Image (tube, rainbow, N blue to C red):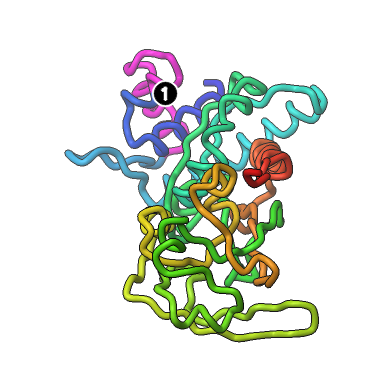
Amino acid sequence: MDRMAAMETFVRVVETGSFSEAARQLRVGQPAISKTIAQLEERLGIKLLLRSTRGLTPTEAGESFYERAKRSIEEADEADYAARGAGASLSGRLRVSAAPTFASLHVIPHLPKFQAQHPNLDMEIVLDDGHIDLIEEGIDISLRMGALSDSNLTARKIGESPRLVVTAPSYLERAGEPRIPGELISHESIIYAKGSGRDVWMFRKDSSEVSVTLRGRVRISAAEGVRAAVLAGMGLAVASEWMFAPELASGHVKAVLDDWALAPIDLWAVFPAGRSVSAKARAFAAFVEEQLANLDLSKPS
């Protein structure tokens, strides 16, 4: 038995939860998958998988073996990649998590370019506004914005975006444009009530600082909902420039109080703690960083 091939088969079965899906991804017949797992269990003398009507789940021993097998495969891939040089193509599977709105605007549209550079690399994008457990969910790299609450995370800052006060021109036509931060209290605000969402903001201009508490009848827990509310002309919102990049460029959304500064928001590439960062994850982080650095945020003339 080819031990590395057997480990790769087992890892793929655990991650897909199915012999048939693992067979499809590995481009072999399902009987070959079943035989490999049976031989692996026989060689190790332990049960690795539990079979039920709901699918396949690893046993406690299987979970432990999965973690070590995945790490061994990643280290083997690292060795191959290092030996072939920086221009080599990556292969295998990369599982990424990211916030849905950010990924839809600034990650997924660029994936064809990344895939063209690495035609043997399969990708799975998990869109989730929450901070999921990277190890439990088998995530190789997570893109997270804002302050990182867990100091034990392995992370690298890959981008920074200004925060702006934004709204639709239709709202400004109806309610007028605020000229100083204090005037925001008389306007309708759309509060992003999740993650870094808050009501109180500190505005800075030269040596002046002004603290403003936003007021509004609408609180929304997802970025896409904030986008929809702003585009519908429901009020003003504090948001990253990334969140409204297309609309700021087209003029469908306008930034106000742009001579006052708010604290920027950071984007982090976060990796599973306790593991060496794979070449695939490092390459993807560098790719996203490059796309953001080249992002055209020019406003309409």
- The one nearer the camera, 100 or 124, is 100
Name the residue rendered at 70%, 22% in the picture.
Answer: 89
Name the residue rendered at 33%, 18% in the picture.
Answer: 30
Name above or below for residue 201 compared with residue 244. Answer: below
- The one nearer the camera, 203 or 120, is 203
Q: Where on the picture, by quarter, is residue 161?
A: bottom right
Q: Is residue 44 magenta?
A: yes
Name the residue rendered at 62%, 38% in the picture.
Answer: 72
Along the horizontal axis of the image, is 288 left or right of 234?
right
Along the horizontal axis of the image, is 68 left or right of 275?
left
Question: What segment is highlighted magenta in the picture?
Answer: 23-45
Along the horizontal axis of the image, is 280 left or right of 95?
right
Name above or below for residue 226 compared with residue 87. Answer: below
10 Å neighbourhood of mark 1: few (<14), some, or many (≥20)?
A: many
Q: Give the residue number, with chain letter if any, for mark 1.
A: 36
* Residue 231 x %, y %: 40, 53
Main secondary-structure element of the magenta-colored stretch: helix
Q: Secondary structure at mark 1?
A: helix
* Residue 81 x %, y %: 74, 28
- For the C terminus, which image quadrant? top right
* Residue 299 x %, y %: 64, 47
Looking at this view, name the residue that lies furthest to the left.
53
**Label 1 is placed on what type of residue?**
Thr
Q: Where on the picture, by quarter, is residue 268?
A: bottom right
